[in-house]
Image (cartoon, coloured by chain):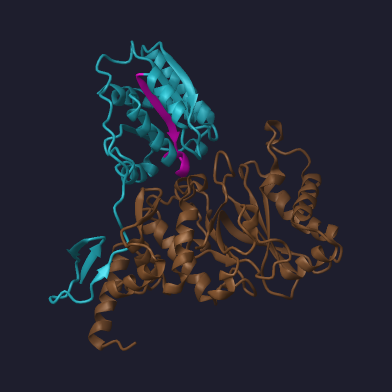
Amino acid sequence: MTTTTGTTTTPMPGATEDGGCPVVLPVGRQGRDEVAPIAPLAAGVAGASLTVLDISKVRSDVFADALEAGLRAAGCDSVDRGVAPPSQRLDEQDLADIGSSHDGAVLALADCGTCTSWTMFDAIELHRHGCRAVLVTTRALRPTVDALAPRLGMASLPVVEVELPNREQTADEIRATAAAVVPAVIAALTS
Amino acid sequence: MAITRDAGADEDAVTEELHRRGMTDGLPVVVPTPERVARFVDATGLPPDHVVAVVPPMAGDATVEVVASNAVMAGCTPDLAPVVVAGVRAMCREEFNLFGVRTSNHPASPMFIVGGPVVERSGFNAGTNLFGPGSRANATVGRALNLIVQNVGGATPGLVDQSVMGHPGRYTYCIAEDPDTPWPPLHTVAGLAPEASAVTCFAGDAPTAVIDYASVEPGDLAEAFAFGVANVWRNPFYAMSEIVLVAGIAHARVLVKHGWDRDDVVREVGERARRQCGPLPLDEIGHRYEAGLHLLCAGGPWGQYSALVNGWVGPGPGSTMTTEEIR
């Protein structure tokens, strides 16, 4: 069997020796233009301007609060807060504003389908706007992130993962999860 | 069409390979041979490399040729090409937010509502067993569009498509509006002429039945619709969900007999749902729940059944229903 996608003809496993029964594959070119990742904040987070973007789902503010507190405790005294919409992208002006006023951004916790896909999109767009963005997601969603991120323009998007979604944890458990992940977030921002 | 034994065996191998590569919905497909695809491409009147739309979530180029390949696999006949092309455009418009709809944990999936002269011309079923099997046009157009989301958009079930439950409409979800609709066709709400043919795309959960065998007064019938609407509005996790009210023909007769036009039905259902609910979760931000009710007429001619199709996250933060003219 031989296949064509657009103007390309390629052999396909199972092809007959005479190349019989060609098909036009039902897939085409995929992916947005590549985005160059913003370099790590080599000087560390102490003097950096950071923002924590809350994905604004159930108890996500608890995670974001604890993450912000952890970053401050680690020596970053310039951390502010914002919101990443869970079912839509950030609009272009918001991305530009965040990018122009922050060295780094942490988007958390991407623990459901759309809030992961759109937040991942926003994180990549923040790199386009000059801000080193880190996505915090769950282990279960990591394969989704790994599959989608290259098509959205950045295979090397900095990602940190946690075990469980917020929705399956109490507030105290969420705080503990967020506190535990702070070193990994700082590492993703700086190295 | 004569198919030799060898050719048939070869097509079986191809089908298995397409399944293995995750390019099907799990059902058998028609092998997209160059000849079949070319016939479909010709029927669009567009060049094969013309990009109809970029399909989320993976930003896949839906060239006419690739659209045709998926449509052939779904079993679409070439005469349905303009409907498929319009459907691709409708679901890929930015305000529909296919990126969000098909990466969500929510079950919603694009539901396509075909209206206008094309319904009868191309054999779409707007009648009995509206959401069910039996119509080649409904089944294959809906299936083609779902395959395009999966194959061109890259919404691989279980990987990028993260719906927890999904629903059967993710195989195919295409209905048609009654050609003799007592209200102006749904696409007139989007500004198209009544005589136009169009595809409307709505991010829909599975349909639920509205059953009322007894009501002969429109207000009583509106109360039955409102019961289902109120169930959605009360749920704070159905954030701003829109709802499509599919009035069965018998129910529509009761409403029309008393002179209720589309606005009357929507307003009366909305007011009754409000009364059933009391204060609603999004009142404090001034959300207009009633603005998210859409009405059309379809279904079998006898029997007092209608349906509601609840949506995903509604316009603004979520998905806006879109309509594309079929040309």
Residue at (73, 69) in percent of width and height: B249
**B50 over B16 or under it: above or below:** above
- Assess whether residue A110 is covered by the magenta stretch: yes
Residue B205 % position (x, y): 57, 55
Q: Chain B rendered in what hue?
A: brown
| Residue B205 appears in the figure | yes
**B101 over B41 or under it: above or below:** above
- Assess whether residue B228 is covered by the magenta stretch: no
Farthest-out residue, left: A17
Question: Residue A96 vs residue A61: left or right?
Answer: left
Residue at (65, 70) in percent of width and height: B179
Residue A112 % position (x, y): 46, 42
**A117 over A27 or under it: above or below:** above
- In front of the other: B199 or A158: B199
Residue A92 % position (x, y): 44, 31
Q: How many marks?
A: 0
Question: Residue A74 vs residue B217: left or right?
Answer: left
| Residue B73 appears in the figure | no
Chain ID, cyan in image: A
Q: Check the picture and name the quadrant holding the N terminus of chain B.
A: bottom left
Res B244 → quadrant:
bottom right
Question: Residue B296 vs residue B196: left or right?
Answer: right
**B150 over A12 or under it: above or below:** above
Residue B186 % position (x, y): 64, 58
Res A157 → quadrant:
top left
Residue at (80, 52) in percent of width and height: B268
Residue at (40, 48) in percent of width and height: B57
Question: What residue range appears in magenta?
Answer: A103-116
- In front of the other: A144 or A83: A83
